[in-house]
Amino acid sequence: MQFKMIHENYNVADLERSLKFYDQALGLKEKRRKTAADGSFIIVYIGNDAGDFELELTWLRDHPQPYDLGEVEFHLAFRADDFRAAHALHEKMGCICFENPSMGIYFITDPDGYWLEIIPSND
């Protein structure tokens, strides 16, 4: 038996803000969308041409409060083909939340507080 990872889900408070962030910060574009007939939720799958793994962003109409992410002891990692340019972009965006120079990595945070690890391509 074999399993293939296909997506990760993040619930978001402001779907358009999140779509803009993921496009600007990581080049992830909308691939498809599902909208509830009653408008209670919208699910958007985003990704890029580097692979077929997708990030699923879910907006729930009846969840007005910020999401409780606990201690944010989880993250999704991205390998950057141009680590210096990625760092410069994220620094300009003001979304770097933690750097570990000894490991050669850093983390950015999305508008809802999810952490995303950025790793150089030579790792």
Image (cartoon, rainbow, N blue to C red):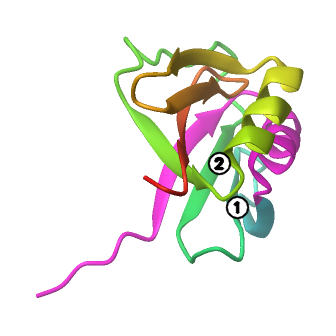
Q: Is residue 86 above or below residue 49?
A: above
**Mark 2: few, some, or many residues within 10 Å (few <14, many ≥20)?**
many
Tell whether 86 sits left or right of 69: right
Viewer-side residue, 102 vs 43: 102
Quadrant where the N terminus is found in the figure: bottom left
Viewer-side residue, 76 vs 34: 76
Q: Is residue 1 above or below residue 52?
A: below
**Residue 99 found in image quarter:** top right
Tell whether 62 sits left or right of 23: left
Q: Are marks 1 and 2 in contact (CB under 8 Å)?
A: yes
Q: CA distance from mark 1 to mark 2?
A: 8 Å
Viewer-side residue, 92 vs 60: 92
Identified at 37% across, 31% down, the residue is: 74
**Residue 34 found in image quarter:** bottom right
Q: Where residue 110 sits: x, y (%)? A: 68, 28
Secondary structure type for disc 1: strand
Q: Amino acid at mark 1?
A: Ile
Q: Which mark is residue 46?
A: 1
Residue 115 makes an appearance in the image: no
Q: Residue furthest left?
A: 1
Q: Where residue 17 sits: x, y (%)? A: 86, 33
Secondary structure type for disc 2: strand
Identified at 55% across, 57% down, the residue is: 121
Disc 1 or 2, which lies upstream in sequence? 1
Instruction: Identify the residue position indicated by label 2 in the image.
Output: 57
Residue 19 falls inside the magenta stretch: yes
Q: Which mark is residue 79?
A: none
Residue 57 falls inside the magenta stretch: no
Q: State which region is magenta.
A: 1-28
Identified at 73% across, 39% down, the residue is: 84
Q: Where residue 9 sits: x, y (%)? A: 51, 49
